[in-house]
Amino acid sequence: MLDSVSRALDRVRTDQPVKPSYFFFAGYLTPNGELHLGHLGGPYLRSDAAARCMGMYGAQVACATGSDAFESSVTYAAAANSAPETAASIATHFTDRAAQALRSMRIRQDDFVNPCQEPVRGEAAEACHRLASALGDADRLTVREEQLFLGTPPAPAAATGAFLSGRCTYCEVPQSGNVCEQCGRWMHPERMTSAWVPDGTSGPAERGGVSSVFVRTAAEMNTEAMRGVLEPEFAHLVRDYPDVFGDTLRLSHPSWWGLPWSTRLTPAPHPESVFSSYVMGKYGSTRVLGARQRERTGVDPFSSGSGVTTVAVGGLDSAFGWISLQALVDPTVDFAPFDHIVVNRFMLLRGEKFSTSRKHVIRVNDAIAHGLSPDALRLMLARVSPSHEESDFVPEKAAAQSGDDCATLLGALRRSQIGGVEPEAAPQFLDAAVAHLRRQRAAFALPSVDLPAAAEALLDWASLLCEGALDGHPRFARQVLALLALPLLPGWAVGVWRTAAEGLPPGLDQEPGIAEHPVDPFDLPPVSAADLDALAEQGRTS
């Protein structure tokens, strides 16, 4: 690395320092369908880009995720086929497909756990049981009878989650499941109006008393305590929760699919009770991943005082699950909830939500099989990645943008031809590099992640190169270009870096295998409208 480039990084690091160590947990995929571009452009790309940025400035970074294998949508998929025994195979198939898609897209995953497979299942169950026992010893658990819609086989004994439909208490939008996809607030099963029968239609159902386990929430789960953990735009998720649910949080529900409730209580909950995947499932997965990280480094990032900054990155429909872990904080439990919870609203496809069930979708594995460049696809999605507001992925507009962006990056590369001895970068060039790097670093000021702003910083620097503003300083220009590209286009960034420097860009030494499949930086084919149309049609017909 040129000394001038190193000084530029140092100046940005001084202004906007990073913590020494980070652990990123992305997504928590519901494995009842294929990973699609909405998932990828939301939590997975946002987490990956933020992690790469922190690593570039010297932090030790680990990345992991898990599948929400026991989520009620998996139960519903098996029940809809009148085959409860297929729940495990459904969850495992789509978990494996998601892991394949993330690898192909260079989304770093040091671990990807599937809670319905051993040994993860046993480890997660034990972690949940230990927590429930500790909460019981602290007299924080209560068993409460609810009036729920009663189910008939192959549905669970009582309807929760995907087996319910109704209207959100707050925004009055028709919804189904655990969470309102419009506002992100939890849906109260006793206030839902219809139970879904396994063919996917709503039908008549009777209510009956069903006993479930709840925990009294910790005082730390309030708006003030979440300052710096959660962006202010999502503070309503914490603020409004007590209006409907009071000071308790669900820990169990009746189902034949999940980790069985195993803590003895009086009175006892429903005999088929399982741990809530939305809360306890997340807790169990973090504990499993933390233990694996401890085996590698000697430190469990989720232990109190670990010194590791933990970051959960998810969509609006999973946000409260991460927030709810704050409710589990107890002096008797050695558990540190996430330091940052990064939330995004949904990416739409032509104005409507991506939907596997309605076949309104572009699937990631289809895009890779179609031959699209992972780097070009990542950049295209970064341009429309959602944050506080929904974004709309319109294939024609996205393809036109991809064509312009790829042309700009390739133009910058071709303009900065490497020659002989290169003079020291003039102060104005160093200042320009620092300004662009600062802009991009600011896009990753956790708990905020602004991928469009990160992409703009990269493309503005590339435009300077295309205009000849850095002629005579090709190595400096290319090294800065590679650094700005690194969070968004890691494969292409490595290729650019190697045209102007030895080794790997900073931070990538932590990622085994990143250099095993070299990318030709002069080959960055844009994503075309024809590509996207073909993929959308494939989603409709298969």
Image (cartoon, rainbow, N blue to C red):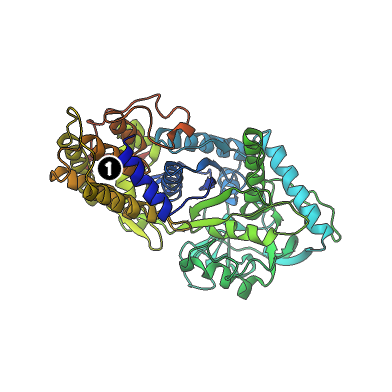
Q: Is residue 265 left or right of residue 39?
A: right
* x, y percent for residue 193: 58, 68
Q: In this view, does 45 lie to the left or right of 68?
A: left
Residue visible at 59% across and 38% down in the picture: 113
* x, y percent for residue 83: 61, 40
Image quadrant where one finds the N terminus:
top left
Please name whichever residue, 24 or 437, is drawn nearer the observer in this view of the structure. Answer: 437
Q: In which quarter of the image is residue 285?
A: top right
Residue carrying label 1: 532
Label count reads 1
* x, y percent for residue 280: 67, 52
Residue visible at 32% across and 57% down in the picture: 392
Please name whichever residue, 303 or 254, is drawn nearer the observer in this view of the structure. Answer: 303
* x, y percent for residue 234: 49, 66
Please name whichever residue, 452 or 197, is drawn nearer the observer in this view of the structure. Answer: 452
Please name whichever residue, 154 or 538, is drawn nearer the observer in this view of the structure. Answer: 538
In the rendered image, the residue lying farthest to the left is: 467
Residue visible at 15% across and 43% down in the picture: 466
Image quadrant where one finds the C terminus:
top left
Residue 368's place in the image compared with 355, above or below, is above
Residue 270's place in the image compared with 374, above or below, is below
Residue 323's place in the image compared with 259, above or below, is below
Q: Is residue 429 left or right of residue 240?
A: left
Residue visible at 39% across and 27% down in the picture: 515
Under tag 1, what secondary structure?
Answer: helix
Q: How crowded is mark 1: few (under 14 residues within 10 Å), some or many (20 or more)?
A: many
In the rendered image, the residue lying farthest to the right is: 266
Q: What residue type is labelled 1?
A: Leu
Q: Is residue 86 left or right of residue 26?
A: right
Q: Is residue 261 shown to the viewer in this render?
A: no
Q: Is residue 35 shown to the viewer in this render?
A: yes
In the rendered image, the residue lying farthest to the top is: 516
